[in-house]
Image (cartoon, grey):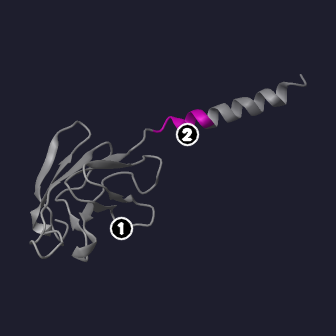
């Protein structure tokens, strides 16, 4: 009888962990398949995904982070552009984005040409749901 409060406490902790852990993560990933480092942002909130991805690398927004849930607009770009560009469709939970292409403006101008980048958006089933050039605005 004297162990009963300990048993109740342990059971309550177990139930809390079980309920909290049963929620499915809703992460998404961004793949930089270019030869350049790119700034990547998910939406425009303080808790949203934000990273600098090196050439041929990727990063993911973990599902336990509140800014990584649901449909998300992904913006990518180079600091020299002044603003980031959008992919043409929101990535969904468990989906991913690929960014590719890219070239310098010219031999004497080291900036990257924003119009030379393209992207693809995939859903959680691996189906490509959008592809094309990056845009200055959302659709």
Q: Position of residue 14 (x, y in %)?
A: 65, 31
Q: Residue at x 14, y 76 (%)?
A: 109
Residue 107, disc: none
Mark 2, mark 1: which one is toward the viewer?
Answer: 1
The residue tagged with tag 1: helix, strand or loop?
loop
Q: Position of residue 121 (x, y in %)?
A: 19, 49
- Relative horizontal placement of residue 115, taking residue 44 as reference (left or right): left
Q: Main secondary structure of the magenta part?
A: helix
Q: Which residue is mark 2?
A: 20
User: Can residue 117 be seen at all in this image of the molecule?
Assistant: yes
The residue tagged with tag 2: helix, strand or loop?
helix
User: Can residue 30 be seen at all in this image of the molecule?
Assistant: no
- Relative horizontal placement of residue 70, taking residue 122 as reference (left or right): right
- Relative horizontal placement of residue 129, taking residue 40 as reference (left or right): left
Magenta segment: 17-23
Q: Which residue is mark 1?
A: 44
Question: Which sits earlier in the primary sequence, circle 2 or circle 1?
Answer: 2
22 within the magenta span: yes
Q: Quadrant of residue 76?
A: bottom left
Q: Nearer the viewer, residue 40 or 52?
A: 52
Give the CA separation, mark 2 to mark 1. Answer: 27 Å
- Quarter holding the C terminus is bottom left
């Amino acid at each position: 009888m004297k162990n009963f409060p300990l048993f109740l406490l342990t059971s309550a902790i177990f139930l809390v962990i079980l309920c909290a852990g049963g929620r499915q993560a809703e992460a998404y990933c961004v793949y930089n398949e270019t030869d350049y480092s790119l700034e990547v942002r998910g939406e425009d909130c303080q808790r949203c995904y934000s990273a600098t991805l090196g050439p041929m690398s990727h990063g993911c927004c973990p599902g336990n982070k509140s800014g990584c849930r649901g449909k998300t607009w992904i913006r990518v770009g180079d600091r020299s552009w002044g603003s980031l560009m959008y992919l043409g469709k929101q990535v969904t939970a468990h989906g991913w984005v690929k960014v590719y292409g890219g070239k310098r403006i010219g031999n004497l101008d080291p900036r990257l040409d924003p119009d030379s980048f393209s992207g693809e958006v995939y859903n959680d089933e691996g189906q490509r749901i959008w592809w094309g050039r990056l845009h200055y605005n959302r659709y």
